[in-house]
Image: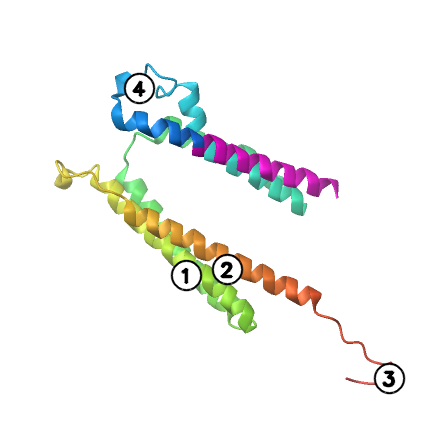
């Protein structure tokens, strides 16, 4: 059970990092971002590129990685997954933030969007094959998650559109888009996937607790 204690500890540490730094940091940082210029912000602890700003920017990344590693340790999966998550995910995020964030490459968005769309329809195809023969309780759990996936693909689509507007000549001089629909779709997506996983967990727990019927030797039930 030692791996479970370590896994739970890492999970709670990850949660604390994300909530404390991202949550409290945003609460303190946003008033500065709303009222100060970039030069004025540079005179505060939140100077762009400074240690506090970088720590805040990577807080969710660090928290999610630590919690994810804890989850892998808890279930005692293959060691490659904790290592791949700890090194690979952080390296990918850091590379995006430090190198490619300021670069707009239309072809990259086109290829990435196409891959996302193909992945979505592949997931729907696998979902149909996976749940067609399941019990109704399992189908209900899976249905919640599919609703969440549909909200996620719509969030991806609108995110692409809103981001492109900031870089396309046709929209120059227009108002900066408010991504309220993106946030709404993301929240609903995460909510429905969470509900689906919760229902699936309850169904699995109920099956484990169901008493096993025993028959007397020589008799068929």
Where disc 3 sits, the SS reads: loop
Say which residue appears at 34% left-offset and 47% top-offset.
183
Which region shows up in magenta?
Answer: 1-23
* Residue identified by numbered label 2: 196
Q: Residues within 10 Å of mark 2 (few under 14, many from 20)?
A: many
Q: Secondary structure at mark 2?
A: helix
Measured in 3D between alpha carbons, the distance from the residue under mark 4 to the one under mark 1, in whole angstroms, is 42 Å
Which residue is under mark 1? 147
**Farthest residue in the right direction?**
217
Mark 2 or mark 3, which is nearer the start of the sequence? 2
Q: Which residue is mark 4?
A: 41
For disc 3, the marked residue is: 218
What residue lies at 31% left-to-right and 48% top-to-bottom? 182
Q: Secondary structure of the magenta portion, mostly? A: helix
Q: Secondary structure at mark 1?
A: helix
Q: Residue 10 in the image: x percent, y percent? A: 61, 36
Q: Please report contact status of discs 1 and 2: CB closer than 8 Å, yes or no.
A: yes
Q: Report the front residue among 152 and 32.
A: 32
Q: Point out the frontmost of discs 1 and 3.
A: 1
Counting residues from the start of the chain, the first of labels 4 and 1 encountered is 4
Q: Nearer the viewer, residue 152 or 196?
A: 196
Are dots 3 and 2 in contact, CB under 8 Å?
Answer: no
Q: Is residue 122 above or below residue 180?
A: below
Residue in front for this viewpoint, 78 or 162: 162
């Amino acid at each position: 059970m030692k791996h479970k204690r370590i896994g739970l500890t890492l999970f709670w540490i990850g949660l604390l990092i994300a909530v404390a730094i991202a949550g409290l940091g945003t609460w303190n940082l946003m008033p500065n971002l709303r009222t100060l210029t970039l030069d004025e912000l540079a005179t505060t602890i939140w100077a762009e590129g400074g240690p506090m700003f970088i720590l805040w920017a990577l807080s969710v990344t660090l928290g999610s990685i630590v919690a994810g590693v804890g989850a892998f340790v808890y279930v005692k999966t293959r060691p490659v997954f904790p290592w791949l998550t700890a090194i690979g995910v952080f390296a990918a995020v850091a590379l995006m933030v430090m190198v490619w964030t300021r670069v707009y490459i239309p072809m990259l968005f086109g290829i990435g969007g196409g891959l996302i769309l193909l992945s979505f329809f592949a997931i729907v195809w696998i979902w149909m094959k996976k749940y067609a023969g399941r019990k109704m309780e399992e189908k209900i759990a899976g249905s919640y998650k599919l609703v969440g996936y549909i909200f996620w693909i719509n969030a991806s689509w609108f995110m692409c559109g809103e981001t492109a507007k900031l870089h396309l000549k046709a929209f120059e001089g227009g108002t900066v888009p408010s991504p309220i629909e993106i946030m709404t779709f993301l929240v609903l997506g995460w909510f429905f996937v969470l509900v689906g996983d919760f229902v699936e967990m309850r169904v699995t727990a109920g099956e484990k607790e169901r008493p096993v019927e025993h028959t007397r030797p020589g008799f068929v039930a």
